[in-house]
Image (cartoon, rainbow, N blue to C red):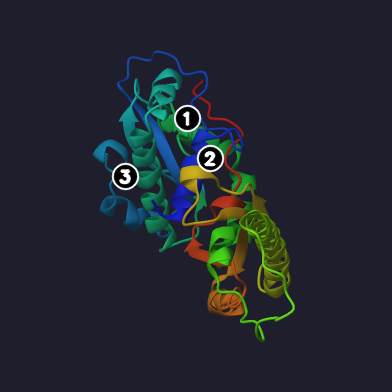
């Protein structure tokens, strides 16, 4: 799972950003609900993209239009994507990953052809009519967001501190043996080694913190906006070390290469610290989805 997709899975699994579950779902006699992946402008890249994409449960994509806006939608089993059904899927990491992967793939494919507002995982409505109502009710807000995001993409920057990697760096060679030095006992040598390990750990985290500050300074003039996410932990973190900074930047597409160049080699020569730059992505961190899915 790539780092951006890991963040999507974390969004669903952790309380940092509540999962967009269907609310007020009621029996309607229908076996299907409408799953919304993204919102864009009607008559643009969404319409030609939809027939080429496959959604959850191999569902065919379509656009649902209301005035100047369109939603990218597929049908999903109503029981599996009801509140209780979705909670059950969340308890299965394999199913959760599949939902996140498919959602991400659809959004990124649409993003290559037009500006989109990505929806959060499991944004589900009772039917297409409810989707149209949502587009009509939030039309002015969505139009403003699309205008703001047009010509921009999201880039992710993560900074890691890895004391083990720092400890593996060879120490500077001494000038020569000190003939006046007293022999060191095994116990004293062990304590010296432990103190050195603690210093290495502190130094790695301090260096990583300073480097994270340097990242923000270097790209400040290249990004329109920045969002600081919670550092990823456990299986969601990629690679060795501890993720101490996890940030997203909204960058004009014509400055993406410049952004990458500004951070290239930033951690070179800094033992135990690394920087990971990902993207460009659809602007997940800068799109505001509906406050709640409505099925009534």
> Residue at point 39% right, 35% down?
96
Does label 1 or label 2 sit earlier along the sequence?
2
Q: Nearer the viewer, mark 1 or mark 3?
A: 3
Q: Residue at x 44, y 23 (%)?
A: 87
Q: Please, what secondary structure does the residue beneath circle 1 have?
A: helix
In the picture, measured across the screen, residue 84 lies left or right of residue 195, that is left
Relative image position of residue 116 (x, y in whole percent) = 49, 54
Q: Name the residue furthest bottom.
A: 175
Residue 178 falls in image quadrant: bottom right
Mark 3: give few (<14), some (14-19) or many (20+) Cα within 10 Å.
many
Location of residue 102 by image quarter:
top left
Q: Which residue is mark 3?
A: 61
> Which residue bears the numbered disc 2?
11
Circle 3 SS class: loop
Q: Answer yes or no: do the residues labelled 1 and 2 have beta carbons within 8 Å? A: no
Read off the residue under disc 1: 130
């Amino acid at each position: 799972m790539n780092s951006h997709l890991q963040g999507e899975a974390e969004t669903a699994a952790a309380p940092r950003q509540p999962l967009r579950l269907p609310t007020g779902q009621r029996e309607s006699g229908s076996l299907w609900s409408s799953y919304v992946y993204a919102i864009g402008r009607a008559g643009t890249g969404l319409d030609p993209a939809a027939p080429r994409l496959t959604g959850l449960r191999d569902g065919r994509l379509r656009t649902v239009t209301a005035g100047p806006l369109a939603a990218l939608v597929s049908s999903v089993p109503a029981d599996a994507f009801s509140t209780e059904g979705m909670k059950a899927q969340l308890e299965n990491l394999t199913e959760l990953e599949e939902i996140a992967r498919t959602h991400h793939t659809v959004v990124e494919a649409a993003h290559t052809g037009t500006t989109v507002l990505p929806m959060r995982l499991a944004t589900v409505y009772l039917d297409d009519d409810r989707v149209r109502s949502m587009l009509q009710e939030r039309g002015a807000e969505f139009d403003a967001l699309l205008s703001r995001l047009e010509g921009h993409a999201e880039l992710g920057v993560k900074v890691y501190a890895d004391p083990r990697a720092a400890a593996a760096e060879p120490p500077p060679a001494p000038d020569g043996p000190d003939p006046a030095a007293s022999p060191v006992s095994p116990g004293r040598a062990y304590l010296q080694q432990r103190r050195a390990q603690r210093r290495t750990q502190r130094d790695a985290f301090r260096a990583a913190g300073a480097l994270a500050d340097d990242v923000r300074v270097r790209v400040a003039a290249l990004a329109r906006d920045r969002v600081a996410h919670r550092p990823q932990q456990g299986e969601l973190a990629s690679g060795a070390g501890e993720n101490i900074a996890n940030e997203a930047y909204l960058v004009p597409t014509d400055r993406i290469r410049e952004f990458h160049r500004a951070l290239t080699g930033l951690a070179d020569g800094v033992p135990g610290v690394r920087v990971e730059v990902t993207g460009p992505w659809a602007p997940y961190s800068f799109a505001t989805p509906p406050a709640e899915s409505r099925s009534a």
